[in-house]
Image (cartoon, rainbow, N blue to C red):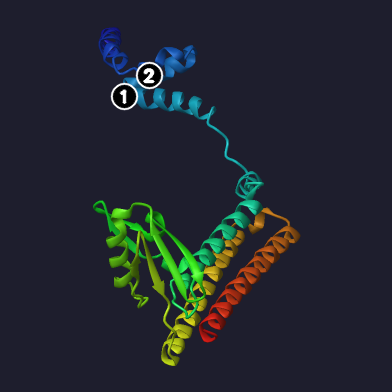
């Protein structure tokens, strides 16, 4: 009887063996150890072979995982900055400040004073050929004397369009035709006009100084972001250069506005 039961138990084990093998992982052939396979087969009969085999393989793969970087390495990467950072910041700030001063010069040239200036008509737009163009693109403006301007169009057929544009401008000029050119006499300014123009100049001065200081602030913000990657002496020197640049452009703007106010009041 005991022999018969033993044979039946062995037969049942053989019948179960294929089902346990069918659960083998496709990568199970990598496991060369007979001991590992025997243990896995034994557990497979209890439905746990796949987990053991998979855990074994995954454990082997974890051995090849990429090591984590140390804190020092991460700190070094964060501190890496462009060696040309300083010149780049200065050139960017310089371009922005120069643009602000150029814009101021353009605005001041639009203000009419009692003295004739060739650039005082540059902002006037002339409609010709179905398009609007700056007056200095369609005509030559020259100064005859301190009170008189001459405007000669490149194309004589545009004379009427140029005249209409000058009359429509806020300068208060009434040019008269003189052959193929226009003669514009600059009328004297009243006291009220002088005061109003000086207020405009003062506002333009404040606006351009704010633009210059915004350029300085942007440069300072950029410096702060990378300050940890540069020696302190280099950072201080760069900040000092930006500050000196700011003062230079602010003074240039103030001098331009003072000259314009003098031109207005002396006319």
Residue 64 in percent (x, y) is at 54, 27
10 Å crowding of disc 2: few (<14), some (14-19), many (20+): some
Tell me if residue 22 can be seen: yes
Count of labels in the image: 2
Q: Nearer the viewer, residue 20 or 218?
A: 218
Q: Is residue 255 above or below residue 118?
A: below
Read off the residue under disc 1. Answer: 46
Q: Is residue 259 above or below residue 219?
A: below
**Residue 251 lies in quadrant:** bottom right
Q: Nearer the viewer, residue 184 or 94?
A: 184
**Residue 235 lies in quadrant:** bottom right
Q: At x 30% / y 25%, what residue is drawn? A: 47
Tell me if residue 106 can be seen: no
Q: Assign a secondary structure to mark 2.
A: helix
Residue 17 in percent (x, y) is at 30, 12
From the viewer's perspective, tell me whether residue 106 is left or right of residue 75.
left
Read off the residue under disc 2. Answer: 42
| The N terminus, quarter of image | top left
Instruction: Give the residue at the far front of this rendering.
Output: 179
Q: Is residue 174 above or below residue 90?
A: below
Q: At x 46% / y 89%, what residue is drawn? A: 195
Q: At x 40% / y 25%, what residue is drawn? A: 54
Residue 212 in percent (x, y) is at 55, 69
Instruction: Give the residue at the far bottom of this rendering.
Output: 191
Residue 36 in percent (x, y) is at 46, 18
From the viewer's perspective, tell me whether residue 55 is left or right of residue 234.
left
- Would you say the residues marked 1 and 2 are in contact, meaning their CB atoms lie under 8 Å apart? yes
> How far is the residue under mark 1 from the one under mark 2?
7 Å
Q: Assign a secondary structure to mark 1.
A: loop
From the viewer's perspective, tell me whether residue 15 is left or right of residue 242.
left
10 Å crowding of disc 1: few (<14), some (14-19), many (20+): few
């Amino acid at each position: 009887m005991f022999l018969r039961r033993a044979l039946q138990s062995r037969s049942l084990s053989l019948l179960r063996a294929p089902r346990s093998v069918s659960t083998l992982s496709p990568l199970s052939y990598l496991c060369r150890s007979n001991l590992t396979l025997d243990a896995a087969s034994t557990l497979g009969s209890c439905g746990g072979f796949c987990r053991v085999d998979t855990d074994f393989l995954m454990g082997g793969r974890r051995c090849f995982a990429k090591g984590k970087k140390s804190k020092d390495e991460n700190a070094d990467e964060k501190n890496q900055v462009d060696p040309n950072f300083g010149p780049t910041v200065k050139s960017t700030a310089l371009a922005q400040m120069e643009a602000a001063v150029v814009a101021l010069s353009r605005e001041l040239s639009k203000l009419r004073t009692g003295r004739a200036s060739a650039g005082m008509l540059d902002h006037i737009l002339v409609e010709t050929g179905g398009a609007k163009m700056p007056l200095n693109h369609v005509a030559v403006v020259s100064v005859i004397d301190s009170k008189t301007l001459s405007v000669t169009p490149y194309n004589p057929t545009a004379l009427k369009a140029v005249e209409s544009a000058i009359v429509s401008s806020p300068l208060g000029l009434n040019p008269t035709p003189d052959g193929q050119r226009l003669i514009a006499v600059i009328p004297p300014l009243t006291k009220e006009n002088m005061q109003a123009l000086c207020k405009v100049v003062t506002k333009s001065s404040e606006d351009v100084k704010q633009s210059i200081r915004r350029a300085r602030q942007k440069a300072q913000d950029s410096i702060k972001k990378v300050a940890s990657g540069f020696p302190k002496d280099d950072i201080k020197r760069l900040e000092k250069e930006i500050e000196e640049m700011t003062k230079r452009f602010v003074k240039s703007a103030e001098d331009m506005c003072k000259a314009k106010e003098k031109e207005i009041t002396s006319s």
